[in-house]
Image (cartoon, rainbow, N blue to C red):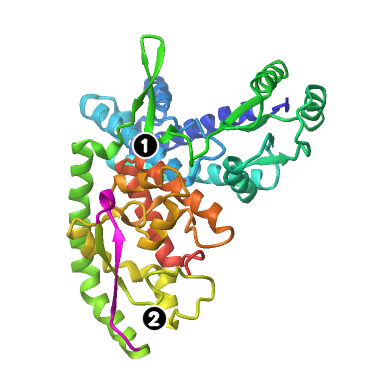
């Protein structure tokens, strides 16, 4: 097993940095607004006790929000969701304490204090997050892993770990299809293997599989089972317990609950109205005029797409291509000759999607959700990728988790990339939250301003 020397200390250092930021902000505000109490020893004793209580509150809250459970594959989107929820609950706690406490420590311009606290914590934790990612991309703090009995189920995962150097995984190839206990253990020890990825549906015999698990347990090597999204029902069930007996229950997704659906729908309507009135009212005429001046054809491109529960609807976009007969059956490719010069700019900034706010108002789409595909694309991939239809359990979105993470499914190894995109969409369906939607919207705005390098 790989020796982990420093990882156990990293979390402790991060916690200490967070507590240092909290203490620094509170002490700064107290001293700057209570000059006459700066040298009062009794006041400082009281303040130290108040700080300790704050530290305990922060740590107890972290057990719920899991901000220190930073998995290697944690994306910045999910990290921000956790951080925002944690800071929001922490600041609400401070505001409540300030209303009932007479301690001057909690009454130092509490609203400004909360704002400074949020900004500094957000900045420090973001810097730490990206610093760790950067160090891992350089090969520091990595995990040695291997794939055993590789098949189509592990291909997507191996592709992800190879591309995402910032996850910090170093892959060692076993180089043999035969499982020999002595050779396998020797390979683990020689390369310091920490994790073995094994397909859930593998070709190993029952006795061989049991032997591999026993060898891994004896040598302190972790085994992670990789399910096949084409065959496994793991996306459709949740693990539950009746007393101590585990049972698989049919999954209920967050947006199956009416309160969540209503919150998302109200936000969609309000946000769409604001965008259409404040931005689209002047932007649409400008874009329409340029489209008409630069190419022949209509301003809008309307195409049938699958929506909620696979109901077909008319998806509205600004036309970015010359008029052609293949638009309903052929997806875009790199340096596609059909895309106009202005159309390329619209695609790069995602401004071609702006008319879809009309689809949102009509209830056919949502602001955030899995992107709707062409009918031909859905019909092609549905029988090839298991649980593909899970995407239709929520309304399609103008933007989505896959898009803000650069997963468009139309570049490189298209089959693998589409699998990764579908996995991102199904993750969104199973783990939706309002905060996640907000983070995705913010990241989308950044992509619109800076340009999406993955857009074609």
Report x, y in % for residue 27. 42, 34
Q: CA distance from mark 2 to mark 1?
A: 51 Å
Q: How many marks?
A: 2
The residue positioned 40% from the left and 31% from the top of the image is 38
Q: Is residue 56 above or below residue 135?
A: above
Residue 324: mark in rendering: 2
> Badges 2 and 1: C-beta atoms under 8 Å apart?
no
The residue positioned 24% from the left and 80% from the top of the image is 285
Nearer to me, 402 or 325: 325
| Disc 1: which residue | 87
Report x, y in % for residue 65. 39, 30
- What is the quadrant of residue 278 in the picture? bottom left
Q: Is residue 298 above or below residue 386?
A: below
In the rendered image, residue 271 lying in the magenta stretch gets the answer no
Q: Earlier in the sequence, mark 2 or mark 1?
A: 1
In the rendered image, residue 299 lying in the magenta stretch gets the answer yes
Report x, y in % for residue 195. 66, 30
Report x, y in % for residue 302. 28, 71
Q: Which residues are magenta?
A: 296-311
Left or right: 274, with 425 as reference point:
left
């Amino acid at each position: 097993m790989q020796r982990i020397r420093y990882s156990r200390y990293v979390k402790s250092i991060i916690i200490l940095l967070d507590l240092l930021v909290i203490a620094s902000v509170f002490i700064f505000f107290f001293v700057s607004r209570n000059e006459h109490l700066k040298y009062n020893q009794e006041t400082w004793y009281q303040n130290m006790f108040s700080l300790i209580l704050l530290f305990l509150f922060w740590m107890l809250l972290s057990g719920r929000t899991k901000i220190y459970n930073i998995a290697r594959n944690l994306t910045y989107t999910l990290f921000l969701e956790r951080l925002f929820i944690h800071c929001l609950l922490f600041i609400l706690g401070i505001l409540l304490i300030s209303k009932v406490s007479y301690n001057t420590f909690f009454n130092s311009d509490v609203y400004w204090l909360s704002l400074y606290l949020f900004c500094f914590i957000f900045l420090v934790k973001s810097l730490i997050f990206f610093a760790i990612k950067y160090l891992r991309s350089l090969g520091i703090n990595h995990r040695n892993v291997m794939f055993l009995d590789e098949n189509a189920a592990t291909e997507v995962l191996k592709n992800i770990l190879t591309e995402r150097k910032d996850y910090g995984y170093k892959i060692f190839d076993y180089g043999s299809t035969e499982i020999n206990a002595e050779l396998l253990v020797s390979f683990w020890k020689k390369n310091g293997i920490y994790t073995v990825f094994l397909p859930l549906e593998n070709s190993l015999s029952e006795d061989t599989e049991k032997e591999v698990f026993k060898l891994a347990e004896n040598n302190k090597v972790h085994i992670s089972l990789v399910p096949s999204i084409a065959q496994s029902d793991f996306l459709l069930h949740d693990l539950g317990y009746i007393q101590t007996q585990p049972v698989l229950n049919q999954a209920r997704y967050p947006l199956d609950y009416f309160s969540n659906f209503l919150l998302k729908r109200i936000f969609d309507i309000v946000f769409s109205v604001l965008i259409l009135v404040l931005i689209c009212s002047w932007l649409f005429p400008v874009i329409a005029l340029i489209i008409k001046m630069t190419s022949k054809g209509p301003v809008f491109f309307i195409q049938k797409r699958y929506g909620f529960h696979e109901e077909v609807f008319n998806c509205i976009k600004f036309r970015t291509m010359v008029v052609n007969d293949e638009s309903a059956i052929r997806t875009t490719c790199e340096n596609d000759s059909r895309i106009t010069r202005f159309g390329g700019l619209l695609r790069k900034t995602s401004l071609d999607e702006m008319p879809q706010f009309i689809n949102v108002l009509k209830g056919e789409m949502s602001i955030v959700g899995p992107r709707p595909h062409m009918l031909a694309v859905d019909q092609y991939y549905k029988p090839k990728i298991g649980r593909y239809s899970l995407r239709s359990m929520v309304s399609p979105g103008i933007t989505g988790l896959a898009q803000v993470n650069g997963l468009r499914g139309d570049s490189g190894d298209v089959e693998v990339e589409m699998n990764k995109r579908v996995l991102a969409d199904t993750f969104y369906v199973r783990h939706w939250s309002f905060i996640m939607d907000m983070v995705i919207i913010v990241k989308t705005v950044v992509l619109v301003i800076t340009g999406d390098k993955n857009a074609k």
